Amino acid sequence: MTADQGRKTFVLKGIGVSPGIVIGKAYRFDPLDAQISFYKLNNDDLIPHEVERFKKALKESTRQLLEIQENLKKTKVTEPLYILDVHILLLSDKKFINRTIKYIRRLSVNAEWALRMTLDHYKQIFEGLEDVYISGRISDVQYVVQRILRNLSGEKHEIVWEVGHEGVVIVSHDLSPADTAQMKLDKIVGFATDSGGRTSHTAIVARSMELPAVVGLDNVTRFVRTGDEIILDGTSGLVVVNPYPDMLQRYEEKKRHYDDAKDEYLKYAKLPAVTLDHYHVQIGSNIEFIEEIPSAIVHGAEYIGLYRTEFLYIYRDDLPTEEDHFNNYRQVVTEKNLLWATIRTFDLGGDKFPSYQKQAKELNPQMGLRAIRFCLKELEIFKAQLRAIWRVSALGKVKILFPMISCIEEIREAKRLLEETRQELLAQGVPIADRMEIGAMIEVPAAAVIADQLAQEVDYFSIGTNDLIQYSLAIDRSNERVTYLYEPLHPAVLRLIKGIVDEAHAAKIRVAMCGEMAGDPLFCLILLGMQLDELSMNHLAIPRIKRIIQQSTLSESHELLKQAMSYNNAVDVRAYVQDYMSDHFPDEFQKKET
Ligand code: PEP
Ligand code: MG
């Protein structure tokens, strides 16, 4: 059946990773589709000219990126500037340039072809590592190559972040965090991709930019052409291509509701999350960049519950120094509107790795030398960070959090190194706080099982559901082929979380949650029923979560949890929770969304 002008109507379901409803025109972005010309330089005299043409394209590409960077600085989205730095650095990378020039000279080929050979060379290296997570890096190289190619062609193409018209929904097979970060928010209103998952870094960047997005659609690029009308619902994960007029009308109505509700929700943001029967949950924000702090405060964050410091490492070629760490952390701990800042020591490896470092070949990086394991091997890198965290502890309230603890020895070793750095700083007369709260992330099932023992070692727990679910249900969190199995309401996940909370409370320590589950309104009463002390989330989710808590009671959530945990399968749990929530919060949850 067809809708507008003979164009087909499709409704596709993916994963809504950044909330909001947008209606716009589709723009197909296929960064890898460029045709690359090939010709031989028949005359050696042409070689210097070809090298010069390549150098000019490099220069122009750098100029363009600097300009985009400058423009980005003027917007409120300044977080992902670092990504552009990587691209600019690549454009002046000696090895990259020399290799391309070498191909031009030795093989007498045009600059485009030489560039393609350089790209192939890099691809081979990355593929040779057999590390699927490396794709994030190769896409940076590809992006840069695309830009140089465009400049070599002399054409002024429209590209994803320079589309000329407004109300554009980007449709692509995949978008790197870099692609996403560079979108012009006055033109682009959302994006839809075939691949990706809820916790991928592209999704995280989209949320921090407040850009509605649906990922993991599998084959959206097969169904959509540039110019198609498109509705994208970043909350439910629905994408409607060429909607019927009545559908469009319904969504326009929904969008109005959503936009009104957004302002309405902000009213709840300033008030604490206290239930009608006086149970108080503290609500914090997760951040990747310090630039997110003002928006986190506006949305009602009382503290920073998770600062993912690895982003300091990811978008640069060299190692951050102790001073770099210090100057960065200082800005978060001295923010007067925040009660405290939880600085998580870097979680490198997995789907995050630094650009300076040659990654060892790991078939299973999510289970490899990641997070605390990596830190306990790279002591110099780790101690520079620990020293900086101690130093900022003299300036404001800071809590330290160690990621991916899987056994007691790891937490003890991390604490030993923390104490060692404390002694070193004291001996040097550097001012530091008398005490700093130490937390362990509980995100490996083994840690959940020994929560009673780990609770003796730390001041608080923070439950990382992104990884806890990944490891307990054996689902690679960045593999879209298994995202359908990602189920926070799986009875095993609920039991694990409940066990962690109960053991923490038995040991009289506080327990927080900082995984994405904490910010999903559907799970809010389940988590309240478990009596988590703190929930830390993407800041856009805060007003909604506060509103639900403010309108609920602890006793009803105990009942809800009890009933939910009585089922032996996730389908029943989900049906029950969804019904309960849509009955009690009809504005927030609609029954069986179409
Ligand atoms: C988690 O695993 O839930 C978490 C918060 O950490 P990250 O997403 O950075 O792995
Ligand atoms: Mg984690």
Image (cartoon, helix red, strand yellow):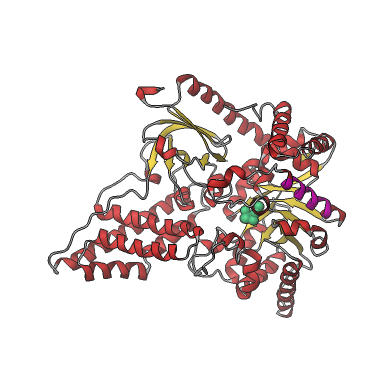
Using the image, determine if residue 285 lies above or below residue 25: below
Residue displayed at 66% across by 34% down: 265
* Residue 500 falls inside the magenta stretch: yes
| Left or right of residue 490, residue 219 in this image | left
- Residue 430, by quadrant, is bottom right
Residue 157: x %, y % from top left? 30, 46
The rendered magenta stretch, by its main secondary structure, is classed as helix
Residue 187 seen in the figure:
no
Q: Nearer the viewer, residue 584 or 343?
A: 584
Using the image, determine if residue 405 lies above or below residue 253: below
Using the image, determine if residue 529 lies above or below residue 474: above
Using the image, determine if residue 556 lies above or below residue 413: above
* Residue 300 falls inside the magenta stretch: no
Which quadrant is home to the N terminus?
top left
Q: Which residues are magenta?
A: 492-503
| Left or right of residue 354, residue 435 in this image | right
Quadrant for ligand 2? bottom right
Residue displayed at 49% across by 40% down: 217
Residue displayed at 83% across by 63% down: 456
Residue 286: x %, y % from top left? 64, 51
- Residue 126, by quadrant, is bottom left
Residue 154 seen in the figure:
yes
Q: Nearer the viewer, residue 532 or 173?
A: 173
